[in-house]
Image (cartoon, rainbow, N blue to C red):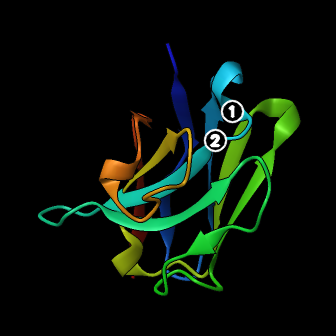
Amino acid sequence: QVQLVESGGGSVQAGGSLKLACAVSADTYLRSCVGWFRQAPGKEREWVGHIYTGGGSPSYANYVKRRFTISQDNAKNTVYLQMNSLKPEDTAMYYCAASRWCTRPFSVTGYTWWGQGAQVTVSS
């Protein structure tokens, strides 16, 4: 059973930073596509970025580029989402997701397994 366990999140003021972690089952972590998505109340879940843990650079949505950074720690089977210069419009539930390959990394349908979500709230 593949498991993704998220941690981090919380509440910050605009301009602040938060870091989310997504721990992936050891048998799945290597050579997996790990994506980050977010969903604000009343809105659809949207792609934030993704990384292929087997190598390559992460990709980001334009609205988080240069503010958010995706990284990985292979020793901990964990992918991180560092969020800087947060804005009130970044407020959402954030989810990590994984799949064997990055065939449809921008779509929720491109991922097989999902984390439980972490709430991020940014106040003005």
Q: On the image, which quarter does residue 41 sit in?
A: bottom left
The residue under label 1 is 29
* Coordinates of residue 114 in the picture (x, y in percent): 41, 36
Q: Residue at x 54, y 54 (%)?
A: 102
Q: Residue at x 84, y 38 (%)?
A: 74
Amino acid type, label 2 = Ser
* Coordinates of residue 19 in the picture (x, y in percent): 64, 56
Quadrant occupied by the C terminus: bottom left
Task: Tell me the element at label 1.
Answer: helix
Q: On the image, which quarter does residue 32 sit in?
A: top right
**Figure label count:** 2
The residue under label 2 is 32
Q: Residue at x 71, y 22 (%)?
A: 26
- Say above or below: 66 vs 121: below
Residue lying farthest to the top in this orientation = 1
Crowd class of label 1 (few under 14; some 14 to 19; many from 20; radius 10 Å): many
